[in-house]
Amino acid sequence: MSEPETNHDGVNAIKVRDLHRRFDHQQVLDGVSLDIPPDQITTIVGPSGSGKTVFLKHLNLLLRPDSGQIVIDNFDVTKLRGAAVDAVREKFGMLFQAGALFDSMSVFDNVAFPLVEKTRMPRAEIKQRVLETLQAVGLEKMERKYPSELSGGMQKRAALARALVTRPKILMLDEPTTGLDPSRTGAIHELIRRTQKNFELTVVLVSHDVPAVFEVSDRVAFLHHGKTHLNGTVAEVMAANDEIFKHFLEGKAAGAENEENEALAG
Amino acid sequence: MIERLGALVLDGIARLGTFVLFLISALFYAIMPPYKPRLLIRQIRTIGSDSLFLIVLIATFTGMVLGLQGYNALHRFGSDTALGTVVALILVRELGPVLAALMIAARAGSAMAAELGSMQSTEQIDALTVMAINPIQYLVSPRVLAGVISFPLLTSIFDVIGIWGGYLIGVKLLGAPSGPYFNGIGSTLTSHDIMTGLYKALVFGIVVMWVCCYKGYNAERMATGVSRATTQAVVLSSVLILAWDYFLTSILL
């Protein structure tokens, strides 16, 4: 269960070993180990406070672990400093929970931003690349709008376009469906799947949207109390018959039902 | 008890350390490539030219009230002729830099803290970091540099407009002699006086931008985080302006 299958050439895009991180009095990550194979969608789920987002922030080097290793392309990135960190980051695209689009810029400028700032690509080529990427996420003809003029789902799409425009190898998504209604959630999941295929990406997806997110996932890692409690393909994890995981899924379902009943009663 | 006191002191020192390091890294990255003149010019526009109307307005009234008070006080000693000198000295050495800095802190500084605070709370600053763009260099350095450039310029404008305001009331309305007003300024005001005012403006420019950027950049990620950062930015910059004013005056006098 804990060892990943080897139908992906035995090479992992990201290898995490025994990651620990403490904030003040709380041990948020307490020995997370996880292999993330290339060209697949690995979804990280877990109850609130299980360290999902903190874990993702370690993968993209926004946070440093107290101990443990993160190996990306055979490099332990936890020891890197300065320009070397930036070099690793250029392999990533990251979609933040709130989108994190720059509200002072149009959609076009937002998506073009990483290319304008970090590359010497000529203007015409940038324009072509941006429009191409916007088309890939289903935002044709929206490039002149400002983020505040877009719906929540469109903002996510624009932010996804910005994450993809540099053509990264690894895409990290932090709760991409937060605040979206079920039909939009489905559309975003479908988009994630399509994007992964088209751009041949390794996707790390943090989500609370169980079980809907399993449809789009190849592998699932279940974090509990700062540890990788379960880890495997969707089928393996579902078949594991694990009590804690079941509680987590049921708790989610029960919680949703309660909210629905309350809404009906209200 | 002692343990808690010690923890408090250590915490205070650590905060002061990050506060100082923030300015040092902003200044360091200001001189490191890549240079982005576009960002600097945009900030000079926000801090400088967009504050111009306010500065002119405040300077006019400050000059007018100095003309009024100055004339009334000097008239008692029969020294109406010294009015220009008094108004100019007060403005150039003291009120110009201080009032201009307070007004820019209230106007541009608060907006800056709020802007950076909301960028922090919506993860836009994290987004810059992940895109391998140094957020201090991209967001903070241009603002501090723009402060260094804009504050002395706005202060000079404040001084000139203020002197005209004093002229308007003291000479045109109350009848102090017109010739000595400007002659007095020309013969008494030394370049040392003017430089003192400009040095102050320069320091205030750094202090205001430093405090406002720091508070916004480190805003807490919650609903009240941005508003708290904005309030703290304006209050702390105002206090620091007046405190530094005393120290600078005692050094430069």
Image: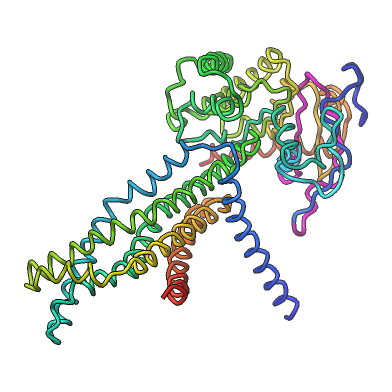
Question: Which residues fall within the magenta stretch?
Answer: A24-52
- Nearer to me, A188 or B199: B199
| Count of numbered tags | 0
Which residue: 70% across, 77% down?
A: B5
| Residue A130, picture quadrant | top right
Which residue: 47% across, 37% down?
A: B37
Which colour assignment does the render follow?
A: rainbow
Residue B24: percent from left, percent from top: 61, 55
Residue B38: percent from left, percent from top: 46, 36
Which residue: 73% across, 45% down?
A: A63
Above or below, A6 relative to A148: above
- Nearer to me, A146 or A155: A146
| Residue A38, picture quadrant | top right
Q: Is residue B116 left or right of residue A195?
A: left
Magenta-span inclusion, residue A37: yes
Residue A87: percent from left, percent from top: 72, 32
| Quadrant of the drawing holding the N terminus of chain A | top right
Q: Is residue A3 left or right of residue B135?
A: right
Q: Is residue B60 left or right of residue A206?
A: left
- Nearer to me, B79 or A165: B79
Above or below, A171 relative to B114: above
| Residue A199, picture quadrant | top right
- Nearer to me, B114 or B104: B104
Residue at the far bottom in the pictured view: B77
Residue B19: percent from left, percent from top: 60, 60
Magenta-span inclusion, residue A127: no
